[in-house]
Image (spheres, helix red, strand yellow):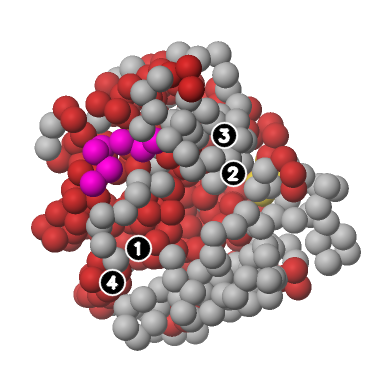
Amino acid sequence: MLSAAILTQTAAFAQTSKQEVLTTIEKVNDYWQSHNKAQCRGFWDNAAYFTGNQAVYDLTGKQAYLDYAIKWAEYNNWKGATQTDKSKWQYKQYGEGMNHVLFADWQICFQVYIDLYKLEHRAERITRALEVMCYQSKTADKDYWWWSDALYMGMPIFSKLYTVTHDQKLLDKQYECYKWTDSLLFDTEDQLYYRDGKYVYPKVKTACNEGKSFWARGDGWVLAGLAKVLQDLPKDSKYRPFYIDRFKKLAAGVAKCQQEGGYWSRSMLCEDDAPGYETSGTAFFAYGMLWGVNNGILPAKTYKPVIDKAWKYLYEVALQSDGSIGYVQPIGEKPDPTRTVDAKSQAPFGTGAWLLAAVEYYKSLK
């Protein structure tokens, strides 16, 4: 349960109108696309932006956004990592090379390719996704997602691809792998996920009473990933109750950690570890909670105050006057106080997260 303080919080600003939100969404996406070429690699940092762009296209139907995504996909030949010899496919260690075909950071692009395939059934758009994910679903290994980010990068692909193939093996493997990750990283007391095994308490302690260290973007990846899984998972799936249980528990754990300014600090239980604003974790949390409320999984009465404070931050602080999204922690894996995070700190994944949250916020307005 959330504390009484959380339940009584209110946003101290007028609700943004639907038209204003829509206009701002397009301004943010237009800014990003006018300042960044579509011809960039299909690795996680860029692909996470394109998941946000896809949500904006679905909302607006603006052809320029679809064209931009297709240019990116074609530049990457509708693939992630390109190694063809399956005996060389890797995932157990971090890697950006072409052998890391089974590494989720090279697979997130498949989410976008599948969405583009659904718009136009051209086989080349999902040929590589089918080859890789169906191969993975038939392996005995279940430790593919050993870091929390992978629950956004890789996990949703299985249920998304299921909507095309209706192959139950994809859902079986998705659940098997998620259960393994959950048993390793989920803290049942605080209802939050550690970033990976290196950070499980007491291996790493915070400056606040030597407590547990939870990284906001890491937990943001998980909440957003679970929302995406639930979006595509069949309503009668035997696995759905477990995903919903974790989604609700994580949302409650996250809500308790929100700062008075509406954001979540990089170190969720100890802002002193890395003080100040941070947008990517906040945006993914807002997206997850908004999706949960919009789809009747999370109670609006409980979460609307949290969402309104988060949107106030995303709209008034993270959003800059030119349409850029600031205060995004650079690429990393922990609450790192040595990395500068300010209004000029931008990244594709931060913009993508902001767009996902804004689209869901738009849907929540009457």
Residue pictured at 54% horizontal, 54% vertical? 220
Q: Mark 2 Cα within 10 Å, few/some/many (few <14, many 20+)?
A: many
Judge whether residue 213 is colored magenta. no
When the figure is inspected, residue 224 is found, relative to residue 308, above or below; the finding is above
The residue identified by callout 3 is 145
Q: Main secondary structure of the magenta part?
A: loop
Q: Is residue 364 visible?
A: no
Q: Mark 3 Cα within 10 Å, few/some/many (few <14, many 20+)?
A: many
The residue identified by callout 2 is 148
| Label 3 vs 1, first from the N-terminus | 3
Quadrant assignment for the C terminus? bottom left
Residue 110 is left or right of residue 267, and the answer is: left
Q: Is residue 176 visible?
A: yes
The residue identified by callout 1 is 355
> Distance of mark 2 from mark 3, alpha carbons?
7 Å
Residue pictured at 59% horizontal, 44% vertical? 148
- Residue kind at label 3, given as amino acid type: Trp
When the figure is inspected, residue 110 is found, relative to residue 333, above or below; the finding is above
The residue identified by callout 4 is 35
- Residue kind at label 1, given as amino acid type: Leu
Q: Magenta region: which residues?
A: 75-81
